[in-house]
């Protein structure tokens, strides 16, 4: 190798040699030494990707007892591809004379031939792990203690991919150079030509052109063309070398036609994609075979299949729909949507929104409950005030009854005295005056009886059970309610057959129950008469009170024609303070039910919508053997 080659190689490996010398010191066990020989430069993207895969895989499968040495022959830039490489063997021998290698990894067919030819000089007992590039194969019979990694040639497959994505293409152009990979082009280009011509399409060879000619040809290519890029290493007329992946970016800007590549390091530099060799996977496979060679016999060869890789940005630029992308393709540089980018934030915001909604709903519900509670408290306070007024009125009624009792008694005494004076009077008007005095005495006694009943109802008394005649109960109750009913023009019909047994109960409490029911019926009838203008007229209402015997039960029914209940729930949910009257207290029916239950009876409400309501008090009759 020339002096420049030796200087480059010496610079690349000097640090590794110092590390190897330290590792060979008596204090540390000897590590396995691996020499990787590449025919091109160390900064080439493909080689960088190869070493990334190699180092990562070796760290996963090995215990770290390896020293890695790298030699990059840089043959393209130095123009020594066809030169005498045997000089490199002697120089490498002198360079690594104190560092015998356990594994040698040539990364191309050229370096494979070089290693096989100089194996006995470089490292006679080393295992060779050869890496074949796409389309290359190790030549001849494998020497002892050697294995290899191979991958399929993918130029033809990439052309087929191009036809899938661009079915209207009319021609295919291939960019490449016969140097430094003659084996690759020799077979791959021939297969590609046959594939293209079998479809009746035009094949354009853009091989071994100068850079300016290549750009000009690309600019003239029609848009219905497909370009397959193999690699461009050196502009022969000018002698300038290029990194194939880097110059590809310039070539993609020179044409309207889509360009496809065959190596994964080409993707992302303007190409649509391709059936690409995974360079990192080749490096990883080489590392695994290197680690496996430690067991003794060389491991079996490994095949690394190519994979379809596409650039989403190029697909969008050429308007390729997702339906044309073959299954299993790896799409890179995909523009992430809002959900792909921000799904954690979106989920968090959604959860927060839901929690806030639940919190707001809870607060609104609590506010409504509070408002309902406040309204209920206000209503109950108003009811308590009203009940207080009723209680006060009851006390005044009792006091009034007491005060009126004395003048009524005096009036009765005077009437009786006048009757005695007129008893022996035979004048013409005496008989008529005696009849008047009798009427006054009867009215006075009736007024006194009413006052007695008022005092009895208001006075707090213990519940006492006695025989209550049904006829007298109804008569006395109507005597109390009669003035109000007559004033309202409400007719009351009584249906009480003779011979009914008496009721077992407290007469005053039963009167109170019947008065509440009669009052409710009267209020309902009055309400039906006060219908708004335009509503059909209602016939004058009436109340029917019936008493029947049902086994051992006296059934007292108060039936009205007040149009029925406005709120049907009252029939099944008799609660205190539940009323449909604007001025009502809502305690009438609960009091009636309480009185009936004290008498071991039951109350039933039957609603006839549009007609009226029937309230039945079912009370046990008096048994002679009952104790008072």
Image (cartoon, rainbow, N blue to C red):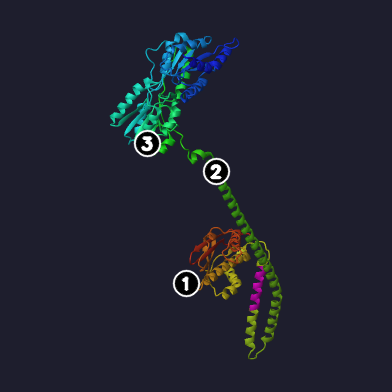
Binning the other alpha carbons within 10 Å of mark 2 as few (below 14), some (14 to 19) or many (20 upward) gives: few
Q: Distance between the residues labelled 2 and 3?
A: 36 Å
The residue tagged with tag 3: helix, strand or loop? helix
Q: Is residue 166 above or below residue 210?
A: below
For label 2, the residue is: 349
Which secondary structure is most common in the magenta stretch?
helix
Residue 324's tag is: 3
Q: Residue 229 carries which label?
A: none
Image quadrant occupied by the C terminus? bottom right
Per the rendered image, the range of residues in magenta is 443-456
Q: On the image, numbered disc 1 is attached to which residue?
A: 536
Give x and y (percent) for residue 370. 62, 54
Closer-to-camera residue (290/166): 166
Identify the residue at the far front of this view. Answer: 238
Residue 447 sits inside the magenta stretch:
yes
Crowding near the residue tagged with mark 3, few <14, some 14–19, many ≥20 C-alpha atoms within 10 Å: few
Q: What element carries label 1?
A: loop
Q: Residue 141's quadrant in the figure?
A: top left
x, y percent for residue 241? 44, 24
In terms of sequence position, does the residue under pointer 1 or pointer 2 come before the other?
2
Foreground: disc 2 or disc 3? 3
In the rendered image, the vertical position of residue 357 relative to residue 137, given as above or below: below
Query: Mark 2 or mark 3: which comes first in sequence?
Result: 3
Residue appearing at x 52%, y 11% in the figure: 95
């Amino acid at each position: 190798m020339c002096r420049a080659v030796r200087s480059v190689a010496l610079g690349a490996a000097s640090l590794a040699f110092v590390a190897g010398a330290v590792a060979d010191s008596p204090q540390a066990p000897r590590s396995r030494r691996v020499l990787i020989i590449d025919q091109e430069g160390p900064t080439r993207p493909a080689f960088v990707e190869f070493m990334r895969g190699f180092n990562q895989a070796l760290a996963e499968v090995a215990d770290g007892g390896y020293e890695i040495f790298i030699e990059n022959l840089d043959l393209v830039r130095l123009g020594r591809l066809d030169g005498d490489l045997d000089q490199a063997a002697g120089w490498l021998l002198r360079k690594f004379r104190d560092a015998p290698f356990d594994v040698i990894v040539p990364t191309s067919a050229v370096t494979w031939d070089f290693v096989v030819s100089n194996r006995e000089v470089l490292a006679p007992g080393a295992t060779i792990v050869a890496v074949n590039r796409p389309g290359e194969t190790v030549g001849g019979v494998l020497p002892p203690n050697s294995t290899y990694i191979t991958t399929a040639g993918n130029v033809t497959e990439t052309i087929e991919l191009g036809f899938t994505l661009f079915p209207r293409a009319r021609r295919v152009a291939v960019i490449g150079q016969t140097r430094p990979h003659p084996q690759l082009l020799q077979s791959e280009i021939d297969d590609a030509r046959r594939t293209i011509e079998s479809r009746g399409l035009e094949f354009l060879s853009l091989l071994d052109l100068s850079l300016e000619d290549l750009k000009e040809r690309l600019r003239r290519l029609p848009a219905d063309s497909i370009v397959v890029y193999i690699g461009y290493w050196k502009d022969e007329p000018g002698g300038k070398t290029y990194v194939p992946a880097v110059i590809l970016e310039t070539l993609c800007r020179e044409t309207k036609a889509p360009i496809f590549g065959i190596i994964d390091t080409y993707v992302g530099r303007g190409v649509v994609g391709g059936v690409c060799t995974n360079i990192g996977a080749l490096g990883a496979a080489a590392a695994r075979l290197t680690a496996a060679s430690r067991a003794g016999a060389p491991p079996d060869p490994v095949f690394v299949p190519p994979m379809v890789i596409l650039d989403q940005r190029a697909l969008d630029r050429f308007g390729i729909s997702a339906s044309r992308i073959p299954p299993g393709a790896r799409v890179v540089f995909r523009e992430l949507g809002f959900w792909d980018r921000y799904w954690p934030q979106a989920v968090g915001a959604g959860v927060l929104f839901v929690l806030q909604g639940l919190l707001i709903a809870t607060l609104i519900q609590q506010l409504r409950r509070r408002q309902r509670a406040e309204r209920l408290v206000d209503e109950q306070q108003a009811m308590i005030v009203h009940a207080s007024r009723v209680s006060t009125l009851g006390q005044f009624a009792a006091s009034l009854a007491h005060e009126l009792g004395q003048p009524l008694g005096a009036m009765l005494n005077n009437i009786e005295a006048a009757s005695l004076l007129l008893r022996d009077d035979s004048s013409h008007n005496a008989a008529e005056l005696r009849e008047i005095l009798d009427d006054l005495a009867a009215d006075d006694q009736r007024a006194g009886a009413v006052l007695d009943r008022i005092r009895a109802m208001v006075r707090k008394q213990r519940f006492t059970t006695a025989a209550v005649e049904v006829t007298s109960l109804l008569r006395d109750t109507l005597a109390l309610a009669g003035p109000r009913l007559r004033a309202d023009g409400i007719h009351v019909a009584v249906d009480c057959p003779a011979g009914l047994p008496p009721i077992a109960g407290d007469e005053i409490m039963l009167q109170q129950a019947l008065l509440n029911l009669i009052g409710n019926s009267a209020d309902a009838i009055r309400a039906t008469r006060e219908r708004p203008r335009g509503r059909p007229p209602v016939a004058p209402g009436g109340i029917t009170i019936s008493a029947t015997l049902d086994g051992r039960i006296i059934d007292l029914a108060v039936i009205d024609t007040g149009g029925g209940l406005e709120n049907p729930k009252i029939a099944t949910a008799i609660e205190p303070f539940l009323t449909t009257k604007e001025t009502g207290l809502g305690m009438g029916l609960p009091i009636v039910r309480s009185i009936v239950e004290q008498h071991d009876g039951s109350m039933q409400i039957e609603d006839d919508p549009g007609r009226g309501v029937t309230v039945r008090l079912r009370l046990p009759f008096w048994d002679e053997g009952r104790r008072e």
